Amino acid sequence: MGAGRERGGVKWTRDILQEAVTASTNMSQVLRHLGLDVVGGHHTHISRRIRAYGIDTSHFRLPSRRGRPWRPRTPERLLVEQPADTARRIPGDRLKWAMTASGVPERCALCGTPPSWRGRPLPLEVDHIDGNWRDNRIGNLRLLCPNCHATTDGYRGRAKRRAGKDTA
């Protein structure tokens, strides 16, 4: 498959892309217009081609929330225990933001290391004290440096693997 070509050998010329962009209000529609599956790889490739050609997309609309009300992300909404049947893993950087916004100091809870080491950034990691990723209450979370985090019983699911081993 050559650069700028679709599976069937169709070249994504400026004219073809301009027509698709003009007939669409977002990138998903552009991909459908071109007969492509709406997946990340196609989205990235076609978006880059459109930018490279300088095709105007200012008429594109922002993604719809499909009738769902907009809810701001606040620490209070993130730092809760989630019900097991509807729980979704919250990314560590988002939990870290909520923790620091709630007043948790940005340093390792075990050794006190700040978020820099020898003049370079040291990313502190979010640790669920009880090992339950659904329990994002502030009392179950702490920030740890990578060294201290690696020594905890629940690091990267270690407690679950140990619990599954037969100790006979």
Image (cartoon, rainbow, N blue to C red):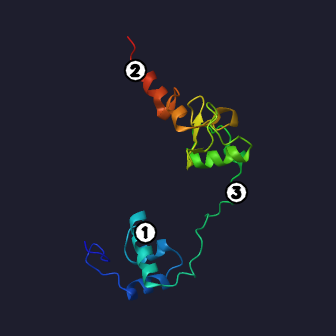
Q: Residues within 10 Å of mark 3 (few under 14, many from 20)?
A: few
Residue shown at the point (65%, 49%) measured from the top left? 97
Q: Is residue 149 above or below residue 60?
A: above
Q: Position of residue 120 (x, y in %)?
A: 55, 49
The front one of 161 and 144 is 144
Q: Position of residue 51 (x, y in %)?
A: 46, 79
At mark 3, the secondary structure is loop
* Marker disc for residue 44: 1
Choose top left, top right, bottom left or bottom right for residue 100: top right
Q: Which residue is mark 2?
A: 165
Left or right relative to 166: residue 54:
right
Question: Which is more foreground, mark 1 or mark 3?
Answer: 1
Q: Which residue is mark 3?
A: 71
Q: Position of residue 25 (x, y in %)?
A: 54, 78
Residue shown at the point (44%, 86%) measured from the top left? 18
Q: CA distance from mark 1 to mark 2?
A: 43 Å
Give the residue type that dot 2 points to: Lys
The quarter in which the N terminus is drawn is bottom left
The front one of 139 and 69 is 139
* Mark 3 vs 2, N-terminal side: 3
At mark 2, the secondary structure is loop
Left or right relative to 115: residue 69:
right
Give the residue type that dot 3 points to: Arg
Give the residue type that dot 1 points to: Thr
At mark 1, the secondary structure is helix
* Mark 1 vs 3, N-terminal side: 1
